[in-house]
């Protein structure tokens, strides 16, 4: 039996956070335009459950992205009413190889914040937060 992992991240603006992570990870954002149009036509969703993003119809409260080949985990961003309150119990590690400083610079360009540098033995990383404050590491 095969299994796939989807990582779900709570947020206020799923489309903005999806754009951040898709850019950072070189993922493709999922286009649900046709599905949303079909659901609207069938009366399964209402107009206020949708939004237009870059000229395409999307679900208002969710957005997703993933590796074009489908080989990695899918990231799903879902809208929740509350703000982040405490440190993440789970976080993403962005592994960069020899390219860490340019990836950190790209994170900052996209709206991330550098929080602190960490080390354990010979392994080092930089802890950052995405535009909504979710911590992640770049190593």
Image (cartoon, rainbow, N blue to C red):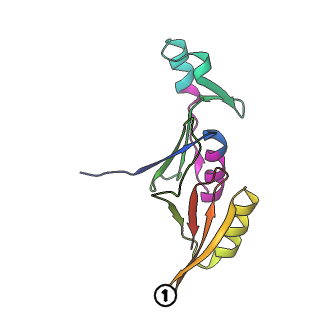
Name the magenta segment's main secondary structure.
helix
Q: Residue at x 54, y 70 (%)?
A: 95
Residue 85: x and y in percent read 56, 49
Q: Is residue 134 left or right of residue 72?
A: right
Relative to residue 120, is residue 131 depicted above or below? above
Q: Is residue 94 left or right of residue 4?
A: right
**Which element type, helix, strand or loop, lies under badge 1?**
loop
Query: Quick one: which residue is furthest to the front in this view?
Result: 85
Q: Residue at x 65, y 47 (%)?
A: 19
Relative to residue 90, is residue 76 depicted above or below? above
Query: Quick one: which residue is furthest to the left in this view?
Result: 1
Query: Quick one: which residue is furthest to the bottom in this view?
Result: 122
Relative to residue 63, is residue 136 depicted above or below? below
Q: Residue at x 61, y 24 (%)?
A: 50
Query: Quick one: which residue is furthest to the right in this view?
Result: 109
Instruction: Out of 9 and 86, give the one closest to the viewer.
Output: 86
Residue 79 falls inside the magenta stretch: no
Q: Residue at x 69, y 75 (%)?
A: 101
Number of callouts: 1
Residue 111: x and y in percent read 72, 55
Quarter of the figure that contains the C terminus: bottom right
Residue 31 falls inside the magenta stretch: yes
Instruction: Out of 110 and 38, give the one closest to the viewer.
Output: 110
Q: Residues within 10 Å of mark 1 (few under 14, many from 20)?
A: few
Instruction: Out of 132 and 55, give the one closest to the viewer.
Output: 132
Q: Which residue is mark 1?
A: 121
Residue 117: x and y in percent read 62, 76
What segment carries the magenta color? 17-34
Asked where in the image residue 116 lies, by quadrant, the reply is bottom right
Residue 13: x and y in percent read 64, 39
């Amino acid at each position: 039996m095969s299994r796939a992992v989807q990582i779900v991240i709570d947020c206020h603006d799923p489309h903005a956070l999806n754009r951040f992570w898709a850019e950072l990870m070189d993922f493709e954002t999922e286009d649900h335009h046709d599905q949303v149009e079909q659901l609207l036509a069938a009366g399964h969703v209402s107009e206020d459950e949708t939004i237009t993003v870059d000229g395409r119809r999307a679900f208002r409260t969710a957005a997703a992205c993933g590796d074009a080949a489908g080989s990695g985990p899918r990231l799903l961003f879902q809208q929740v009413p509350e703000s982040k309150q405490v440190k993440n119990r789970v976080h993403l590690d962005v592994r960069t190889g020899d390219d860490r400083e340019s990836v950190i610079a790209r994170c900052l360009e996209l709206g991330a914040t550098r929080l602190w540098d960490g080390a354990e033995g010979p392994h080092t990383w930089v802890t950052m937060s995405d535009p909504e404050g979710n911590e992640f590491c770049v190593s």
